[in-house]
Image (spheres, rainbow, N blue to C red):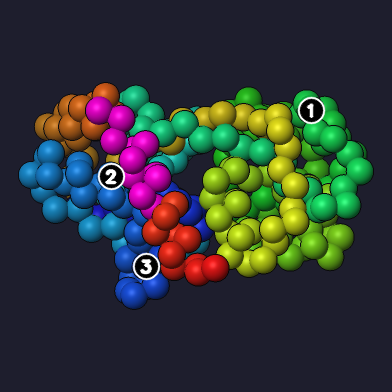
Amino acid sequence: MVATGNPEYTPYLWRDPTDETRLIGANADLMQLLSKEIGLPIEVKYQGSWARVQEQAKNGRVDLIAGAFFTLPRLEYMDYFYPAFRSTRTVIWTPAKNTFTYKTWGDLKGRKGLTVINNSFGEAFDRYAKEFLQIDEVSQLEQAFRMLGVGRAQYIVYEEDPGRALATKLGYDDLKTSSVAVSNEGLHLTLAHQSPCNTGEMRGRIAKALHKLTKDNVMKQLVENNIQRWRQQVGP
């Protein structure tokens, strides 16, 4: 089976610097544990940007997405496994000289925001943002950080851990994150409808194995291991 995911998602997923066709990280390590449980090889491959990954899933060119939030539109092309294997925290990123304090979604009204294309931060916030907020989408988080740095936006909506990892790598250590979360969402494993592996028997095997791994709380150690791995790659 072929799994993929967001390649800008440290410590969960990022491109292997020694083999850029592969993704490594906590979610990739989880796929290897899952592989052992179901007795089937799982390759975790780089398939392009997060937007492209979702297109690949729609077309059945990949089997599994190792880490996706729940949204209704995604149900049209992939099945979700429960429970979520990790809970993540989305925050507001602002420049060091920012003068507004984020406490509620309403604080973002009238301000120009950025996020990464095809990203979701949970059904409730997605609906609110579409109706009330001005949030432009860019292809990569690095581009959003650059635009924020030169004043082309007032804030970024993005997850705390992956955002902090990339900000550290790029030297944006002075960016501030809100103490109040925009949302706390579960990360799910999904299986593409168009995947030839999507059978009742296989869904059952994966669901049973994932339930066991989640119950054993394996992600806690995998995340800690991969934070250290990332820091070693980036260097001092």
- The residue at 44%/52% (across/down) is 227
Labels 2 and 3: the sequence-earlier one: 3
Query: Which quadrant does the C terminus fall into?
Result: bottom right
Q: Is residue 70 visible?
A: no
Q: Is residue 221 a member of the stretch shown in magenta?
A: yes
Residue kind at label 1, given as amino acid type: Lys
Q: Are marks 3 and 1 in contact (CB under 8 Å)?
A: no
Per the model, the C-alpha gap separating discs 1 and 2 is 34 Å
- The residue at 56%/29% (across/down) is 184
Is 60 on the left-hand or right-hand side of 86? Answer: left
Neighbourhood count class around disc 1 (C-alpha, 10 Å): few under 14, some 14–19, many 20 upward: some
Q: Main secondary structure of the magenta part?
A: helix
Residue nearest the observer in this picture, 7 or 72: 7
Asked which quadrant contains residue 25, the reply is: bottom left
Residue 179 is tagged as none
Labels 1 and 2: the sequence-earlier one: 2
Q: Which residue is mark 1?
A: 103
Is 126 on the left-hand or right-hand side of 19? Answer: right
Q: Which residue is mark 2?
A: 30
- The residue at 63%/67% (across/down) is 170
Residue kind at label 3, given as amino acid type: Asp
Neighbourhood count class around disc 2 (C-alpha, 10 Å): few under 14, some 14–19, many 20 upward: many
Secondary structure category for the residue under label 1: loop
Q: Is residue 49 visible?
A: yes
Labels 3 and 1: the sequence-earlier one: 3
The percent coordinates of residue 8 (x first, y second) are 51, 58
- The residue at 52%/30% (across/down) is 185
Q: Which range of residues does the magenta coloring cover? A: 216-226
